[in-house]
Amino acid sequence: MLKFISRNILTGLVTILPVVFTLYLLYWFAITAESMLGNMIRLVLPRNLYWPGMGLIAGLVVVFVVGLLMHAYLVQRLFAKGEQLLYRMPLIKSVYRAIRDFFDYFSPTKKKEFEQVVAVSIGDTGMQVIGFVTQADMQCLPKDFREEDSVLVYLPLSYMIGGYAVLMPRSAVRPLDMNMEEAMRFTLTAGVTGSTTPPSGGG
């Protein structure tokens, strides 16, 4: 009986927490934008012209403009310089890098770097893991890290932030019929969510 209750509580948490976390992030963004930017707007606008929600709209505009500016090479270089400063700070660098890696999973620009979802064979054990080909052109790798007929594969860790970039022989990988979103969700949850790709074959 206790096991039954525990299992259902865990299932409920797994179901509810992603929704709650997503809604909380949206709520936090809305409240923060309205509070900070709303106060700034009230300083420059007459009181009777301000209406609730202007801070949130201003926050969305700021996020959009930042995303737009990040397409410019100069802005990218300046942002990279700023990140290098954060990476030199003992405590901040660990926290920032972990957060950056997590959000990079969902970045539209980063997704383009993953060329193919593949299954990677581990030795002669028959074991396979899901990975993402991040570099198929060996000329783009450091000179001492190039091998003929090999590809660079990223192996994400389940329920953790991070993973491993490994150089694999092409013979050790095979393409999978999964898109980036399906594969990342599948690996990050250790397969708990299952695959959304329908099985092939008729019946």
Image (cartoon, rainbow, N blue to C red):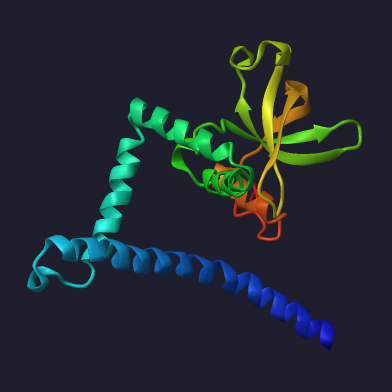
Give x and y (percent) for residue 161. 66, 49
Number of callouts: 0
Give x and y (percent) for residue 192. 70, 60
Q: Residue at x 62, y 21 (%)?
A: 136
Residue 65 vs 36, above or below: the answer is above
Task: Name the residue at the right extreme.
Answer: 125
The answer to whether residue 8 is left or right of residue 89 is: right
Quarter of the figure with the N terminus: bottom right
Q: Quadrant of residue 173?
A: top right
Q: Residue at x 46, y 64 (%)?
A: 25
The answer to whether residue 53 is left or right of residue 156 is: left
The answer to whether residue 177 is left or right of residue 43 is: right
Residue 1 vs 7, above or below: the answer is below
Give x and y (percent) for residue 23. 46, 69
Give x and y (percent) for residue 41. 19, 62
Nearest the viewer among 101 and 194 is: 101
Quarter of the figure with the C terminus: bottom right
Residue 180 vs 52, above or below: the answer is above
Q: Residue at x 59, y 36 (%)?
A: 88
Nearest the viewer among 88 and 161 is: 88
Q: Residue at x 49, y 65 (%)?
A: 22
Nearest the viewer among 142 and 87 is: 87
Q: Quadrant of residue 3?
A: bottom right
The answer to whether residue 115 is left or right of residue 30 is: right
Q: Quadrant of residue 76?
A: top left
